[in-house]
Image (cartoon, helix red, strand yellow):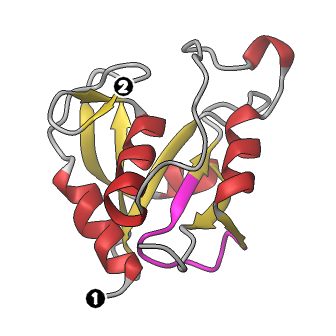
Amino acid sequence: MTVAERIVIEARSWIGTPYLHQASVKGAGTDCLGLVRGVWRAVLGGEPEMVPTYTEDWAEPSHREVLRQGAERWLVHKAIPDVAEGDVLLFRMREGSIAKHLGIQTEAGATPSFVHSYTRHGVIESPLSLPWQRRIVARFAFPQGAG
């Protein structure tokens, strides 16, 4: 089984976990970053760095792309059109705001989908519809050398 296949299986195993800001515990609570962190731990082992406390508005007041910078440190940057299952997607929810939502692509092709932890919904698998696709600002792969 490939790392990407293991990532998709693990991401889907989080479905139904309630949304909980700053948490990363399957079945108990997680936010979108916590989901990616939990999948990393399950597939690749220990997290590469401690995540500092963060507010729900992230770094909006300072306009610092904190989430993107972290992703660029530990994940493999890809071109947005280079679609693959198991990719981490970074979204900008509103034009002019910082990117602060993550998901993991679970299906590619004609009916793409992704797993994410969404406020008031918890961890769900959603169609990667055109409105979601337009919000993608970066695509990353998990590193392949671990696990």
Q: Is residue 85 magenta?
A: yes
The local crowd at label 2, few if under 14, some if 14 to 19, many if 20 or more residues have their Cα within 10 Å, is some
Residue type at numbered disc 2? Ala
| Residue 130 as seen in the image, left or right of residue 95 | left
x, y percent for residue 127: 33, 57
Q: Is residue 1 magenta?
A: no
Residue type at numbered disc 1? Met
Q: Nearer the viewer, residue 70 or 93?
A: 70
- Asked which secondary structure carries label 2, the reply is loop
Residue 8 visible here: yes
Q: Which residues are magenta?
A: 79-89
Query: Which residue corresponds to mark 2?
Result: 23
| Quadrant, the C terminus | bottom left
| Quadrant, the N terminus | bottom left
The local crowd at label 1, few if under 14, some if 14 to 19, many if 20 or more residues have their Cα within 10 Å, is few
x, y percent for residue 77: 71, 67
Query: Which residue corresponds to mark 1?
Result: 1
Residue 110 visible here: no
